Each structure stands twice: as structure tokens, then as C-alpha cells.
Image: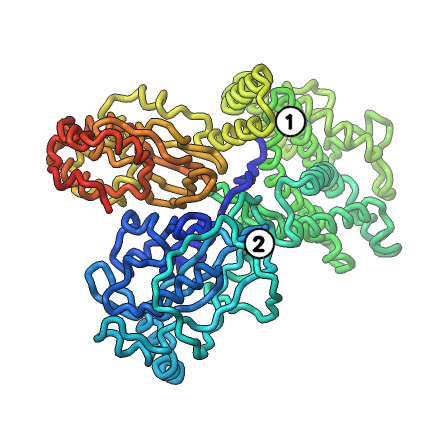
């Protein structure tokens, strides 16, 4: 399979960034679109809903002046100053008395932050809400609380009991505009208080322009980052590629690919020359000679030192190389990369990079030669990692055959080194001289002489003969011209023949079967990818759409591994299909309030009807005018809803969009486009399937319709206005036969 590149397509991570950073801060905020009339609210988080007691459905599309949170004792001056800040696209803090849904009131500190795009135009507002009593309790600063009560809030103290009462302190605190910032800087002003003149008490209706021109005044003060987003997160509301930390290498970059090939060649060199050097080239005579002329007297030792240095550099590069986590996200944070590397291949790479022969150089021990030979074989640990990397290049039959041949030759090379080491170690102790090395010397006329250490066959003669013996033993039972004579040699020959028979039977005897079995998924991937490319070529698909097709195919394949769930489920009985579907959709059925209280049989019936869909960023799920025959539940990612290319809502995890099925007898048409901002996973169910299941469980249907809150209703209002009797007709359908007239009223 190709290298896992992760989610590298441009994504709009604006909402995901804010939610991720706010998870541990207990923020209560909403987002409003400055390009819509009255700056309509397009998103509010769960903390906001919990603070005021409203559901997200009741808040969406309302003006961001939050008039629905005001009451009889809310100072009109504070409302006016909040409206002025929104109209002027300025950052400010406002102390205001708000009311919850249960009519209880509390002091609230509202932060207004304008959000600009890359052109400097204010397109959104973020409003953060803090319970003032809780905020002061957290800060625990007596001086600050006294200052707040005496300077800022004293004037509005009496307004709780007197409707319309106003004071000079109930207004807006010092504000500044944010300009000359190319990205979305989500900052609040510093908490400095000063007196302001009383604003007008008349209500101001906010009709935001389609483009608010950026202020030209210079901003020299550092804006306090109350939201604690930090300099590393400056989200923009646009499609943007994943951000990579400075000094971090992408795991699929050209430099990393070239470097991996270089390390692969060095590892192959190590796998070949390390056993050869340890068995044939290291001797007591070599040690004494190297002690006289220094460590760099042998070119091979210099090359080994360079290889060790390259392995150390590779360790450093691995600490700065991105990786793909379990969510297919590219991780570029240095600390997370280091932790991932420490838990993975660091220990093997570290042991393989230690120059043991340099560390024990000139130790003066008699066992130095043997110890160096054993410790140098630790470099072969690198082969474990290389074997894992080679898998990405071994997806073609010719490559597999070549790798099998190389593996067979490498094993024969290692066994030849061991065969020579056995004969060389026991030769001085044999009497009579019956070892294979002495027999080789007799055959070649190069007999060993005890008084001359350099006597006997040359290194080339010994290596070629040993390699010939191992190849003949691995592929057959040998020819007898090089035969084992001692017990040690015979035991080793038995082991070699066992290894050879296993390799011959399992590899060479079943090459085609191994390729078909191990790479059937790869073959299916390339077959499907070829069909997609042929489809693109035949229909002359333009380049942007072609990239979307290929990106979606690769994303869907990495997510499902080419498995067609429908085809798999059809091979099982219906009861088992229901259990599998219940497991696949368990998160939705357990956490969505609409499904609470359903019997196990009802949940099983619903699970079978649900389907899962995946959408890459930029993919349009619903187009303007499409028939709303499906109800969508978002399980991951974020989407935007657009009307005339203007964002009217941003939906995230656990949100629902479509139309309230119980209120309409026939499906309507979509009034907006729905487009994915990030990689999204959605559960969807057809309207007819939902009505069919609820018709079989009428007792649960009443509870389901009362608890189901469609976050954004896509139904075109004009369609409903042309059919005034549609609500009455809806009560006669099977699905809504138990819904009363009061339940059929649309949500506010």
C-alpha cells in the first residue's frame, strides 16, 4: 500500500480549533456571522446552552445582540453599547444583566471579539459569556472585586429593582480594534476599567454590511490573550493546509524519501559486511596491527564509522519527522513526535548506532576480538525496521520476487559466515586435522602451518567455499565436495538443511500463492484506482474535480480498507446484521437524546436503517433545491451551511440537520447548501425508513418526536407557505399518527 500521508487535504479547522482549545477552559461562547442581517448566530457551544438553559436549536439564527436573554431589569444602556460594539466591529467588554430560560437573572460579563479574514474584513464575531460571580470567586482577588463593584457595577446595582434604571458604570469597558493581523486572532481586551460617557438608551438594530472595512489605525499594544489560544493557533475561516512546526520534516517529503533510501542502502551494507567483517576480517593479528597504526588504518573501519555517524543523524531526523496517528492526522508537534519515537523504534535505532568496536578499542583484553565480532552484529537490529519500511515498496509481484531472492541470498551469506566461524574456532583444537578448513587447504595445496599464522587458503577462497556450501545445502542436500567432518559441523549442516527445506517449501514452492494471499488487498486497491483513473480519462474530468475524486477514493479506502459493508452484511443472517449495525452506530444511539428510552428491538431496527458516510473537506453534502429525504447526524468533523455563499450556520459533532420529519407529510426542498469544512463522518437515515420503524413502535414515536431537536432546518420556508394544510396532512401519516396537534407546531 502507498505511504500513509494522513489528512493532508486543505481543511477549514476554524471551529475545531476553537472547540479543542476551549475544552479545558469551560468557556461559554457563540459565533455570529457579520455578513448576515442582524449578525445571526451560526454556532453556540454546549457551555453556553448550559449557562442559559436554552437548546442549540432555540439559539441558532437569532441576532447576536441576544435580546432573548434580556429581561425587565436589563439596563438598556448596556444593550445599546453592546449593539454599538457590534455595529462598529470593535472589541469590548460589557457588564449586563441576563436572564436564563427559567427566568432567573445573573450578572454576565460579555466579551465581543471581531474576527477578520485574510483580506482584513470582519466576517464574524465571537461572544464569550462569563458568570461574574463565578469569575470573581475564581480570581479570589479582593482588590479587583472591590474595584469592579465600586467603579464599574455600582451604577447598575439599583437597576435590579427598578426597571429602566441606569448608571454610569453599567456600560462597556475599554475596547480596541484588532487590525494589521493577517489571521484570525481570537483575543480579548485587557481588563482595564475607565469611565465612559452614557450611551443612548434607544435600541439599535444591527444591520451588518457585507464587508466591514478594516481600521487603519496602528495597534502597538499587545492584546491580552484571554482565550489562551497561544501564538501557535491562529485559525482562519478558510481552507488551509495542515500546519507544520518550524524545523519539522514531513514524513512523505522528497528529502525524507531520499534519506530513507540512503539509510536503506547503509542498512543493506551493514547486513552484508558486519557478519563478514566479524567472521573473516577480525583476528588477533588484525587487532595488534590496528593498535600500532591507529583506528583509521583500515578503510573498512573508516566506512563503519561513517555508517555509525549516519545512523546517529537518522535518529536526530526521526525526532523531527511527522507521523500519522490513529485518526489519520499528521502530527508535527516536536514533543508528541519525541514521545511517539521513544515508544517505538528509538531503542532499536540507538543500539544499532553504538560503535562498539570504537568503545572497546585498545582495552588490552584477550577476548577483544570475539567481543567486537559479537557486538557488531547488534547493527543487524536495523533490519527489523527496514523490513517494516520495505512493505510499502513490496506491492508488485516483481518486487516481491526480488525481495525473496535477496532474503534468501542474505540468509545464505549469514550462514556462510557462521560456517567459517565454526571451522576457524575449533581448528586449533582438532587432532587430527579433519575440519573443513584443513580439507580445503589440502584440496587447494595451501596447507596450514602452525608456525605461520598467514598460511592456509586465502580469505576469498574460504568465503567462496563457505557460501557455496550454504547455497548447496539450502537448495538441496549438497554435493559432498565440501562436507562436514566434525560433530559441530554436522550439527550445523543439519540446521542448514532444515532451514533450506523450510525456505524452499514455504517460499519458492508457493511464490504465486504467497503473492495472491498477502497482496490481494493491494491488487484490489490498484484495480479500483485504475477504474477511477480510466473514468476520469474517458469523461475528461477537469483537474480540481479529478483531485477531489482521487482524494475521496483514497480517504474512503484508508477508512474502510476497501471493504463493502453492505456486501459483508448480506452474508450474515438478519439477527446478526442487526447486532453488527447496533455496534457500528452505538455512539449515536447512546448519546443522542432522541433515542433514549427506546427498547432494544427498536434500537436494532433503527440501527439496520442507518448508514455511515464520509465526506472530505470541500465536499457538498446537500445542494440548494435538493429533496430532503434524509436526516443527518454528525459524529465527527464540522460543516457549514451557506445561502448565496454566505455562512448561516456552522455545525459540529452531535448536531443534526435536515428537516423535522413529523411536521411535514411530504419531503421539502433544501433552502441552502451544506458543505464539509473538515473530514466528516455522518450517520444518515432515510425519511421513509425512519417513519417505517417509528410506525412499528408508536409508544416510542411520541418520545422521539418530542426529544428530537434538528439543529438546522434545511426545509425551504416558501414551500411550506404554499401548502398551509401540510401540517394537518402530516397527522394522517403512519409515522405521525400519534403526534398531537400541539406537538406538530414548529419550534421557535
Q: Write down the residue under mark 1.
A: 403
Q: Residue furthest top?
A: 538
Give the camera-side residue of 207 and 637: 207
Disc assigned to residue 479: none
Residue 736 in sight here: yes
Residue 630 pos. (x, y %): 31, 30
Colour setting: rainbow
Element at label 2 = loop
Residue 204 pos. (x, y %): 37, 60
Give the mark count.
Answer: 2
Give the camera-side residue of 270 and 530: 530
Residue 697 pos. (x, y %): 13, 32
State yes or no: discs 1 and 2 in contact (Cβ < 8 Å).
no
Q: CA distance from mark 1 to mark 2?
A: 57 Å
Disc assigned to residue 120: 2
In the image, residue 587 sits, relative to residue 511, either above or below, namely: below
Residue 506 in sight here: no
Q: At x 61% / y 36%, what residue is drawn?
A: 389
Residue 490 pos. (x, y %): 63, 29
132 lies left or right of 189:
left
Quarter that holds the N terminus: top right
Judge the density around disc 1: few (<14), some (14-19), many (≥20) Cα neighbours within 10 Å.
some
Element at label 1 = helix
Amino acid at each position: 500500500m502507498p505511504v500513509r500521508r494522513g489528512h493532508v487535504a486543505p481543511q477549514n479547522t476554524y471551529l475545531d480549533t476553537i472547540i479543542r482549545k476551549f475544552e479545558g477552559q469551560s468557556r461559554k461562547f457563540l459565533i455570529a456571522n457579520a455578513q448576515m442581517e442582524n449578525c445571526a448566530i451560526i454556532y453556540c457551544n454546549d457551555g453556553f446552552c448550559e449557562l442559559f438553559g436554552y437548546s442549540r436549536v432555540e439559539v441558532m439564527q437569532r441576532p447576536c445582540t441576544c435580546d432573548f436573554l434580556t429581561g425587565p431589569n436589563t439596563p438598556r444602556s448596556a444593550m445599546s453599547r453592546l449593539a454599538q460594539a457590534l455595529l462598529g466591529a470593535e472589541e469590548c467588554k460589557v457588564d449586563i444583566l441576563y436572564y436564563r430560560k427559567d427566568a432567573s437573572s445573573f450578572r454576565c460579563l460579555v466579551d465581543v471579539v471581531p474576527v477578520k479574514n485574510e483580506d482584513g474584513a470582519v466576517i464574524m464575531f465571537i461572544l464569550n459569556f462569563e458568570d461574574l460571580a463565578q469569575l470573581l470567586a475564581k480570581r479570589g482577588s479582593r482588590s479587583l472585586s472591590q474595584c469592579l463593584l465600586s467603579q464599574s457595577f455600582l451604577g447598575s446595582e439599583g437597576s435590579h429593582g427598578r426597571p429602566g434604571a441606569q448608571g454610569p458604570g453599567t456600560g462597556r469597558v475599554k475596547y480596541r480594534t484588532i487590525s494589521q493581523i493577517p489571521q484570525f486572532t481570537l483575543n480579548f481586551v485587557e481588563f482595564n476599567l475607565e469611565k465612559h460617557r452614557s450611551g443612548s438608551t434607544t435600541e439599535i438594530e444591527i444591520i451588518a454590511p457585507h464587508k466591514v472595512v478594516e481600521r487603519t489605525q496602528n495597534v502597538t499594544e499587545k492584546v491580552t490573550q484571554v482565550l489562551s489560544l497561544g501564538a501557535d493557533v491562529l485559525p482562519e475561516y478558510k481552507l488551509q493546509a495542515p500546519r507544520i512546526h518550524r524545523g519539522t520534516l514531513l514524513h512523505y517529503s522528497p528529502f525524507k524519501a531520499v534519506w530513507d533510501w540512503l539509510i536503506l542502502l547503509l542498512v543493506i551494507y551493514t547486513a552484508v559486511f558486519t557478519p563478514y567483517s566479524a567472521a573473516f576480517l577480525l583476528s588477533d593479528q588484525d587487532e595488534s596491527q590496528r593498535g600500532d597504526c591507529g583506528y583509521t588504518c583500515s578503510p573498512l573501519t573508516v566506512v563503519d564509522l561513517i555508517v555509525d555517524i549516519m545512523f546517529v543523524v537518522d535518529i536526530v531526523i526521526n525526532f523531527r519527522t511527522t507521523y500519522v496517528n490513529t485518526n489519520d492526522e499528521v502530527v508535527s508537534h516536536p514533543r508528541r513526535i519525541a514521545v511517539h519515537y521513544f515508544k517505538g523504534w528509538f531503542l532499536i535505532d540507538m543500539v544499532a548506532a553504538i560503535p562498539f568496536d570504537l568503545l572497546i578499542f585498545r582495552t588490552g583484553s584477550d577476548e577483544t576480538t570475539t567481543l567486537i565480532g559479537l557486538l557488531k552484529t547488534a547493527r543487524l537490529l536495523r533490519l527489523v525496521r527496514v523490513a517494516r519500511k520495505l512493505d510499502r515498496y513490496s506491492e508488485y509481484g516483481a518486487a516481491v520476487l526480488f525481495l525473496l531472492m535477496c532474503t534468501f541470498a542474505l540468509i545464505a551469506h549469514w550462514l556462510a559466515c557462521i560456517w567459517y566461524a565454526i571451522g576457524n574456532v575449533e581448528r586449533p583444537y582438532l587432532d587430527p586435522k579433519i575440519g573443513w578448513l584443513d580439507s580445503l587447504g589440502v584440496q587447494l595445496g595451501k596447507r596450514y602451518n602452525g608456525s605461520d599464522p598467514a598460511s592456509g587458503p586465502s580469505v576469498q577462497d574460504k568465503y567462496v567455499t563457505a557460501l557455496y556450501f550454504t547455497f548447496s545445502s539450502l537448495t538441496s542436500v549438497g554435493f559432498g565436495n565440501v562436507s562436514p567432518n566434525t560433530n559441530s559441523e554436522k550439527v550445523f549442516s543439519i540446521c542448514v538443511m532444515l532451514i533450506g527445506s523450510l525456505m524452499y517449501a514455504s517460499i519458492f514452492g508457493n511464490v504465486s500463492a504467497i503473492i495472491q494471499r498477502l497482496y490481494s488487498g493491494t491488487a484490489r486497491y490498484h484495480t479500483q484506482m485504475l477504474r477511477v483513473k480510466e473514468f476520469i480519462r474517458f469523461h475528461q474530468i477537469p483537474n480540481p474535480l479529478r483531485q477531489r475524486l482521487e482524494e475521496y477514493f483514497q480517504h474512503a479506502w484508508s477508512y474502510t480498507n476497501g471493504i463493502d459493508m453492505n456486501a459483508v452484511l448480506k452474508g450474515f443472517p438478519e439477527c446478526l446484521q442487526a447486532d453488527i449495525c447496533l455496534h457500528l452506530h452505538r455512539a449515536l444511539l447512546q448519546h443522542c437524546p432522541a433515542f433514549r428510552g427506546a427498547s432494544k428491538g427498536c434500537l436494532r431496527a433503527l440501527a439496520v436503517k442507518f448508514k455511515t458516510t464520509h465526506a472530505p473537506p470541500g465536499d457538498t453534502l446537500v445542494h440548494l433545491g435538493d429533496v430532503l429525504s434524509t436526516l443527518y447526524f454528525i459524529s465527527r468533523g464540522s460543516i457549514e451551511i451557506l445561502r448565496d455563499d454566505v455562512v448561516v450556520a456552522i455545525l459540529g459533532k452531535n448536531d443534526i440537520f435536515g428537516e423535522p420529519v413529523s411536521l411535514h407529510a411530504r419531503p421539502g426542498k433544501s433552502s441552502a447548501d451544506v458543505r464539509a469544512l473538515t473530514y466528516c463522518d455522518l450517520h444518515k437515515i432515510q425519511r421513509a425508513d425512519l417513519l417505517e420503524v417509528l410506525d412499528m413502535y408508536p409508544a416510542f414515536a411520541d418520545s422521539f418526536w418530542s426529544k428530537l431537536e434538528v439543529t438546522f432546518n434545511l426545509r425551504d420556508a416558501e414551500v411550506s407557505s404554499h401548502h398551509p394544510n401540510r401540517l394537518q396532512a402530516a397527522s394522517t401519516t403512519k409515522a405521525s399518527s400519534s403526534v398531537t396537534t400541539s406537538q406538530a407546531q414548529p419550534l421557535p
